[in-house]
Amino acid sequence: MTTTKLHRIHTVAASAATVLVLSLMLILLSCVTTHEGANGGAITKVAHRGGSLLAPENTLAAFQRGIDEGCDAIELDVHLSRDGRLIVMHDPSLFRTTAVEGYVSQWSAAEIKDLDARASWRGEGEYGVQRVPTLEEVLDLIVRQERHVELQVEIKTDQKDRRYGGIEEAVVNALRSYGLIERTVIISFDFPTLLRVREIEPALRLGALVNRKYLETIGMAGPAAVAASIADLGVEYVAINYAYLSQKLFDEFRRSGLLIGAWTVNNEKDIRRISAMGVDFITSDRPDLLRELLP
């Protein structure tokens, strides 16, 4: 065989090897989990009730802990007191977190402020007395942070699952007064609440919360029907219990133009599975775990 022929064979072999290597690289890259949402940005890390496995839930200590753990946003819940103040608490009942009988709607804000919100705390770490905060106190904490922190405010219903009269206006006014409209997503399981917020302040982003009860009704018609019903609300986000977020439902939400969040994801395996889907935010009681697992 001549030197020229050998040179040609080597050249062809080298070219084939190069193509093979490039093909393998493309395959590998296509398998890498980038942890990015639909807008190409990193998944938003949300501290649920401030991070309720790290500090007493829905307290200023919890919100600061979630922020210190590097979360992008904190999630909180609001009810109205008897005198019309916005109280940050998950349940309509005072008992679980304060060990005092009664409902938020039956007590004044001053009376609620005398209570200690540590009754349900079973985690590690010593915390002194934690007063139940008002929404304004949390907003003040947010604007005093050195870095940009966003909010997810869940507007709750009362002990009879009724909307609080004027709560939407009160929340919007509080956000306006602190200049936090652009940094807030209003979320709720009560869809009329979301529609009312849209009427009052169109600039606010909205998120519809989807639970098992909703899926057992609308969901009986299939994932496409669920996605269509949420999209018809005109909201930007849908947030669902992570246990019910199948790939099929995720795909239908995306086809409907919705941004997608999952709650409440508290272990490594589930955080990795949900993030691999490419959701837009993950809400967790373990903001420290989100910090470790997500960029």
Image: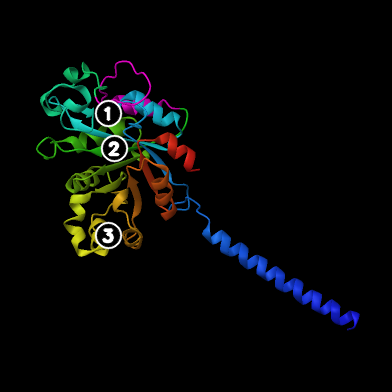
Q: Disc 1 vs disc 2: Cβ atoms closer than 8 Å?
A: yes
Confirm whether residue 121 shows in the render: yes
- Magenta residues? 120-145
Instruction: Point out residue 118 in the picture as x, y percentages from the top left corner.
Output: 27, 22
Distance between mark 1 and mark 2 Cα atoms: 9 Å
| Residue 135 disc label | 1
Residue marked by disc 3:
227
Give, as a three-letter code, the residue at label 3.
Ala
> Residue placed farthest to the right in the image?
3
- Find out whether residue 133 is within the magenta segment: yes
The secondary structure type at the circle numbered 1 is helix
Give, as a three-letter code, the residue at label 1.
Leu
Q: Disc 3 vs disc 2: Cβ atoms closer than 8 Å?
A: no
User: Looking at this view, is 44 or 163 the one in front?
Assistant: 44
Residue 176, image quadrant: top left
User: Horizontally, is 141 left or right of 114 in the view?
Assistant: right
Instruction: Point out residue 58 in the picture as x, y percentages from the top left corner.
Output: 29, 29
| Badge 1: residue crowd in 10 Å (few <14, some 14–19, many ≥20) | many
- Which is more N-terminal, label 2 or label 1? 1
Residue 129, image quadrant: top left
The residue depicted at 21 percent of the width and 59 percent of the height is 219
Residue marked by disc 2:
153
| Residue 203 disc label | none
Name the magenta segment's main secondary structure. loop
Instruction: Point out residue 222 in the picture as x, y percentages from the top left corner.
Output: 23, 64
